Image (cartoon, coloured by chain):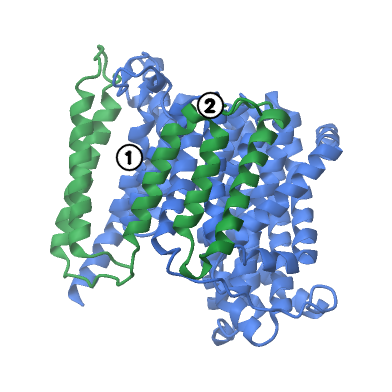
Chain colours: A blue, B green
Amino acid sequence: MLELFSVGIANVFAPFVLVMMLIGTIVGIIFGAVPGLSSVMAIALFLPLTYGMDPGQGLSVLIALYIGSVSGGLISAILLKIPGTPASIATCLDGHPMLEKNEGAKALGVGVVFSFLGTIISIIALIFIAPSVAKIAIKFGPHEYFSIAVFSLMLIATLSTGSMVKGIFSGVLGFAFSTVGIAPVDAVRRFTFGSVELYDGFDILTVMIGLFAVSEVIKIAETSRLEGKTDVAKVNMKVKGFGFSIKEFIEQIPNGLRSSLIGLGIGILPGIGAGTSNLVSYTVAKNSCKKPEKYGQGCIDGIVASESANNASVGGALIPLMTLGIPGDGVTALLLGAFMVHGIAPGPLLFVNYGNLVYTIFIACIVAAVMMLIVEFYGMRIFAKILKVPRHILLPIVFVFCVVGAFGLSSRIFDVWAVVVFGVIGYFFVKFKVPQAPFVIGFVLGTMAETNLRRGLMMSQDSFSGFITNPISGAFLIATAIFLAVTIIKEIKQRRRMANQ
Amino acid sequence: MSLSKKKEIAFGIIIVILGAFYLFMTYQIESKPGVVDARTVPKILGFLMVLLGGIQIFETLKLKSKEEESKSIDTGTVVKTSSLILVYIAVFNKIGFLLSTIIFLFLQFSILAPNDMKGRKYFVINGIIAILVSLLVYMSFRYGLKIMLPQGIVTFI
């Protein structure tokens, strides 16, 4: 293991990689900070730049973007009272009141430091948990994979925000799009409409870019002409250190630790990540506090809870991605695509065949977290200025990068059209308030579920019993059934209550 | 955060139609002997979609009508933006990345510009940004990353 670590360190501490990661961190923070730009866009934008790098270099850069962008949201959450990304919604609640109390610098300092600590805690968990999970997962066959995929699909569809019907529909539609192309096992052509380009189906990257980036460009058109220039609050940054005392820091350690663990746990669950964990951990912190009324008035506890949780989800989301090939959220779905561009399939074999790569990614996570801490703190003034760059300039440029990224996949205009199609779908999702994440997860896990269903059936001579008798597979299927039943009962009860009111 | 009843029902109908179409298409898939073939999973998905659409319509009809959120939407700009994107992609391969991107960016900036950021000054700034960004992207991909973007009619760079 130490040997692998040293290889990882050597890979990451190459000047080229460090410079690219630094740029990645900065761009990530900007994308996190500017409302309307997101982590997914940042990675979509940088992805084509990594086509030419080796997998370790490319993924290190993308990790830096990911970590930077999850943290960057705190800047606008505090300075604009608008969360830069859904990951920082709870940061607004106490961040802006602190700014009004003239404690803006302290709020930013606390946010940055606990973003860093949350990231580090989750990465340590990743380093210790992932290899052991991979060791178990390596024995998994099609039965286990099928059941895990079904379990994850059910989780994302029911846990995603908003209406359950819409969440499930989103997942089903994503699954349906994954059936386009050549079917697993028997290689039958499906929904190809005679087009050769459809034989291989849609690429995950075109799905992601379209759904998350292009839809955003169309969405901004709804309001961009009506809004004026952005007002950014001025903050007096002349403070000692990070703006808070050691006593305050020590007081916040239990809160930060608990929030990090919540973020880590939510990050591991498929389909939900930083966007959910910051809200959950804020609520938990508030409820377990002796003086819950101080939350929302501008106390650092709220910022600690939100910012350590959202960044801790990063390490959490990487665990199922690296050990099972299951993306935890939209960003990790894109990272899955990035692995595939380099011809590597994430999963337990990654730890056997690409040990160097795994430890390079671990080291890259730590380095990116340190870079984030330094860049965000010392560059705060610059980031505050960037918030003023109008979005009507930024988003079309992002769109051009999306087009280039899709085209660069295999130099086909077909992929660019696919991006536009998924962009339109994404826009309709926004209009009808359908969550987008289940679509992506359905698209990825759909293929996994179907392939393993068919392989499993081949192994057990067309009998379904193998899925139940296999202990791990059976356990996941039973868990799926129980969870689904509980969710439906809860939903029905809630409707009754609403109808009675 | 609730949509109007009409919109919710329309959404349900869209799902049902989509599901029905998908289900119809699954019967065009070549069938092979066995418990599960290439048709099975798509069939389940199609049925699920129709079912979900049904639940969506039924649920909405049962609920009391909600108030529509009043948020002004600039439909003209949305239509212009979407059409511009379609035209851009359509000509992207023919007239080349550089030219099409410069035109696309310039027009898109102008379409999206807020009312207080219009006039000759912004016209020039937008033009310069469009040209610089397009050149930078093209050059860095072509020479830095060796990814060929469509050259089209601009063959001298």
Residue A372 pos. (x, y %): 74, 57
Q: Residue A301 falls in which quadrant of the image?
A: bottom right
Q: Secondary structure at mark 1?
A: helix
Marker disc for residue A173: 1
Q: Residue A57 falls in which quadrant of the image?
A: top right
Question: Where A23 sits versus A500, above or below?
Answer: above
Residue marked by disc 2: B152
Q: Residue A241 falls in which quadrant of the image?
A: bottom right
* Observer able to see residue A413: yes
Extreme residue toward the front, this view: B120
Mark 1 crowd level (few <14, some 14–19, many ≥20, 10 Å Cα)? many
Of residues A11 and A313, the one nearer the viewer is: A11
Residue drawn 69% across and 76% down? A107
Residue B85 pos. (x, y %): 42, 43
Quadrant assignment for the C terminus of chain A = bottom left
Q: Are marks 2 and 1 in contact (CB under 8 Å)?
A: no
Task: Pinpoint the chain carrying mark 2.
Answer: B
